[in-house]
Image (tube, rainbow, N blue to C red):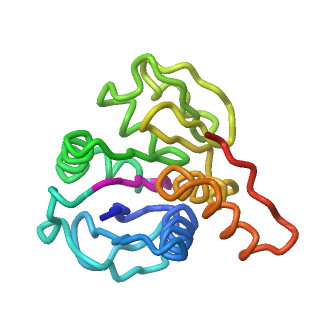
Amino acid sequence: MIAILLADGFEEIEAITPLDVLRRAGLDVKTVGVTSKIAVGSHNIPVVCDITADEVDLDSVSTVIFPGGMPGSLNLDGAKLSDDMIAAVNKNGGIIAAICAAPLVLGRRGLLEGKRATCYPGFEKELRGATYTADTVTVDGRIVTARGMGVALEFALTLVEMIKGKEEAVKISEGVCEKCTYAPRI
C-alpha cells in the first residue's frame, strides 16, 4: 500500500495530485488521516481520508508520501505516525517522498544525510545533511523530494516511474495532457 499522510493544514494539490495519478497507474493508494477521518487542508478544503492512523497495517506500507503545506508539514513532523511510517517503509525497502515544506520531516530525522534533496524555497535549512539541488524533483535512492504545488504532477509521475516504470509514467502523462510528455528521471 502507498500511504499519503494527511494532517490538518496540508497543501491540497500536493496530496490529491499524487493520489489521482498513482490510482490512474492502478496502484493501491490510501489517504491516512493523521488525527482523524477528516483532514482539513491549508485552504480549508476538508478531505475524508480512506483510513485513520489506527487502521494502518504497517507491514503493508511500501511507500509513504508527505504533502507539504503549513501548518500541515509541522503537524506531520509532530506526529508519531510519521515515525511509524518511515520505520515501516525503511523495513519494507520502499520509497519515502515529500514535497514543498514536508522534506523538513525527513531532514529533522536525519534521513537526508549525504543525500541530494529539494524543497520549497526558504526551507533549505531543514534539509539537514543534504546537498540542496533547487531542482523541481530530486530522486536520491529511495528518497524523492519536490519543490511545491507547481510540480505536484511531475512529483507524482516520478513516483509512478519508480514503482511501475517509465512506460507507465509516460502513458499517464500523455493521458492527462495530450501535448505534454513526461521526461523520465531514472
Position of the C terminus, as image quadrant, is top right
Q: Is residue 143 above or below residue 59?
A: above
In the image, is 12 to the left or to the right of 57?
right
Rendered residue at 52%/54% (across/down): 159
Residue at the image point whose x is 19% and y is 47% from the top: 88
Q: Is residue 126 left or right of residue 176?
A: left
Q: Is residue 68 magenta?
A: yes
The residue closer to the viewer here, 163 or 67, is 163
Residue 158 is left or right of residue 114, and the answer is: right
Please provide percent x and percent y for residue 80.
17, 49
Which quadrant: the N terminus? Answer: bottom left
Q: Is residue 5 magenta?
A: no
Residue range (magenta):
62-70
Residue lying furthest left in this view? 54
Q: How many marks?
A: 0
Residue lying furthest right in this view?
179
| Point 35% across, 71% down: residue | 31
Q: Quadrant of residue 151 in the image?
A: bottom right
Q: Residue at x 52, y 65 (%)?
A: 18
Residue 154 location (% of width, % of height): 66, 55
Q: Nearer the viewer, residue 33 or 112?
A: 112
Q: Is residue 50 above or below residue 34?
A: below
- The percent coordinates of residue 12 (x first, y second) are 52, 68
